[in-house]
Image (tube, grey):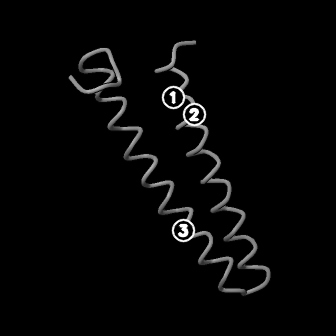
Amino acid sequence: MSLKAFHVFFILISILMTTLVVGWSVRAFKMTNDMSHLGFGCLFFILGLGLTGYAVKILKDVGRNGTGGES
């Protein structure tokens, strides 16, 4: 597996993990009505959005010039 492929794979796994944490946090908030769970979920939702934007940028770079770096 190339370094570029591993990087994309790692980002996608990270997005999946943030999605799972958001789901867990919402479920915990519904069960306990503790706002800290909701805040934690919001934080990870924002992180997931950032990772998604980064993944889109990386995939456009890879698709445009075949590399993940700037040219």
Q: Amino acid at mark 1?
A: His
What crowding class fits label 3: few (fewer than 14 Cα within 10 Å), some (14-19), or many (20 or more)?
A: some
Q: Which residue is mark 2?
A: 10
Q: Label 3, secondary structure: give it.
A: helix
> Distance from label 2 to label 3 (Cα)?
20 Å
Q: Identify which amino acid the numbered label 2 is placed on.
A: Phe
- Mark 2 is surrounded, within 10 Å at the Cα level, by few (under 14), some (14 to 19) or many (20 or more) other residues, namely few
Give the mark toward the camera: 3 or 1.
1
Instruction: From the top left corner, tell me how far across and down residue 67 is, in percent.
Output: 33, 18
The residue lying at 49 percent from left, 29 percent from top is 8
State the residue position of label 3: 43
Sequence order check: which comes first, mark 3 or mark 1?
1
Position of residue 33 in the picture relative to residue 46 (left or right): right
Q: Which mark is residue 32?
A: none
Q: Position of residue 2 (x, y in %)?
A: 52, 13
Q: Rounded to the nearest whole Å, what is the CA distance between mark 3 and mark 1? A: 23 Å
Q: Could you tell me which residue is drawn at 46 percent across and 21 percent down?
A: 4
Q: Secondary structure at mark 2?
A: helix
Reading the chain from its start, which is encountered first: label 2 or label 3?
2
- Residue 20, above or below 57: below
Q: In which quadrant will I find the N terminus?
A: top right
- Tell me which amino acid carries mark 3: Leu
